[in-house]
Image: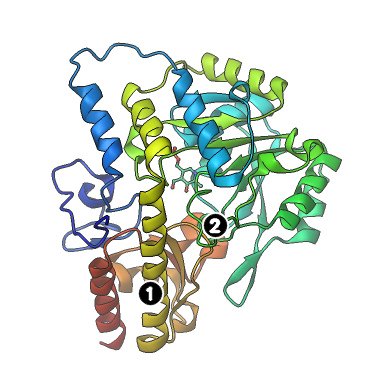
């Protein structure tokens, strides 16, 4: 019913992905497959809600509506069968600003914050820009699937200066959906060492096996009470430009500390349109999401098959979640600079350089496959020509 195959021209919409004149990602003639938004129209009910609100010509300060919190509460119940309380939530204008607030609220200057690399790069900036120190634990790759590095984690978490861990769940860029067992094992380690877990679950709805995502807040109270979770409709329903997200925790002290710090940092309000869009998406977007997931999985399988058949020296595992693929170019034997040059200058593809996500990304590139399949067909044909030249 929804037309995910339709190619929609984004020129003239002020799109970072398509219109920034960035020589690495969308310079002259390049196909941009980098920054994580999708080239699909959002659910029509969201557009209708925005138009309805926009037709009232006064855009003054909005209240944080009860229905904003209720819509997330209902969504969590519908998707995961979990009951959460409205009193466990607050709003924050974007997950990245929220990460900054959480780090400021829960750690002190020079404390250490653990991340599992390769990982969504603003995790590094959020830690460093707040004067804290990044500690990395490299994920372990086994035939294209990544796992946590348990011995390394146990050792690093035991450092008394590690006070917080940023967990990406599901994980960008490697596409893992962490299992309940993995999360429990991790949570146990963190609780033993008094480390607070900040779970970024912005990709929680974009999983390919129904029911596979385990929300961190659904773990046993002794684990979940030492955590906060970020959630948003922005990745799921393609609303990233509306900068509206949530923090959820059953730990009232953590919620209070987060809210007070957010307020001190100037994050008092939420965007009027962001709230309207979020409510509409959670209340009316489920059918759209069901179809989106089928389309996205088809895209990932297309890339996986196409590479195996035409360019077997390059591979991409079908991720368990997200519309981001982790492409492995290591067999080409190129340095990262040579690889980037080949992709950008010859194939004219704006893939996201793997090392952006940590040194473990050497030999990799991240592809955003949240787009009509014709764009991916074009990308594969450019890649084939550049490699076989
Ligand atoms: C793991 C993760 N967290 C956060 C964000 C961005 O969140 P926001 O736009 O709400 O700041 C992204 C976007 O790609 C992401 O992948």
| 209 left or right of 46 in image | right
Residue 163, image x, y percentages = 74, 36
Viewport quadrant of the C terminus = bottom left
Residue 319, image x, y percentages = 51, 66
Q: Does 67 appear above or below 161?
A: above
- At label 2, counting other C-alpha atoms closer than 10 Å, the crowd grade (few under 14, some 14-19, many 20 or more) is some
| 317 left or right of 284 in image | right
Provide the residue designation for mark 1: 303
Camera sees residue 113: no
* Mark 2 → mark 1, Cα distance in angstroms: 24 Å
Q: Does 252 appear above or below 6?
A: above
Q: Does 118 appear above or below 163?
A: below
Provide the residue designation for mark 2: 358
| 130 left or right of 297 in image | right
Q: Which image quadrant is residue 111 in?
A: top right
Q: Which image quadrant is residue 174 in?
A: bottom right
Q: How does the figure colour the protein chain or chains?
A: rainbow
Front-lying residue, 120 or 346:
120
* Residue at x 70% of width, y 60% of height: 148
Mark 1 falls on what kind of element? Answer: helix
Task: Check if mark 2's residue and mark 1's residue have beta carbons within 8 Å.
Answer: no
């Amino acid at each position: 019913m929804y037309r995910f195959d339709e190619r929609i021209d984004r020129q003239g919409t002020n799109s970072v992905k398509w219109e920034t004149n960035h020589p690495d990602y969308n310079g002259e003639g390049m196909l941009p497959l980098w920054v994580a938004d999708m080239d699909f129209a959002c659910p029509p009910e969201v557009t209708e809600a925005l138009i309805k609100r926009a037709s009232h010509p006064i855009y003054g300060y909005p209240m944080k509506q009860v229905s904003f919190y209720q819509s997330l509460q209902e969504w969590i119940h519908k998707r995961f069968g979990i009951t959460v309380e409205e009193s466990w939530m607050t709003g924050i204008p974007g997950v990245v600003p929220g990460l900054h607030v959480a780090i400021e609220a829960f750690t002190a200057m020079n404390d250490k914050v653990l991340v599992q690399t390769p990982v969504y790069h603003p995790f590094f900036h959020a830690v460093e820009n707040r004067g804290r120190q990044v500690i990395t634990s490299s994920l372990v790759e086994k035939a294209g699937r990544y796992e946590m590095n348990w011995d390394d984690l146990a050792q690093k978490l035991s450092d008394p200066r590690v006070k917080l861990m940023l967990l990406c769940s599901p994980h960008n860029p490697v596409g893992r959906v962490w299992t309940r067992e993995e999360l429990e094992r991790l949570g146990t380690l963190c609780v033993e060492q008094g480390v607070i877990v900040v779970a970024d679950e912005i990709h929680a709805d974009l999983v390919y096996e129904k029911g596979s995502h385990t929300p961190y807040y659904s773990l046993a109270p002794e684990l979940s009470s030492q955590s906060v979770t970020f959630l948003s409709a922005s990745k799921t329903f393609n609303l990233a430009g509306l900068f509206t997200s949530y923090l959820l925790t059953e730990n009232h002290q953590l919620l209070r500390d987060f809210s007070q710090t957010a307020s001190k940092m100037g994050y008092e309000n939420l965007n009027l349109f962001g709230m309207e869009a979020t409510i509409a998406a959670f209340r009316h977007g489920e059918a759209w999401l069901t179809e989106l997931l089928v389309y996205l999985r088809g895209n990932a399988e297309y890339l996986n098959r196409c590479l195996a058949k035409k360019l077997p020296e390059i591979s991409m595992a079908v991720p368990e979640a997200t519309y981001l693929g982790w492409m492995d170019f290591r067999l080409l034997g190129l340095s990262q600079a040579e690889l980037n040059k080949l992709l950008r200058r010859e194939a004219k593809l704006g893939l996201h350089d793997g090392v952006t996500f940590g040194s473990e990304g050497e030999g990799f590139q991240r592809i955003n496959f949240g787009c009509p399949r014709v764009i991916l067909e074009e990308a594969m044909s450019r890649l084939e020509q550049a490699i076989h030249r």
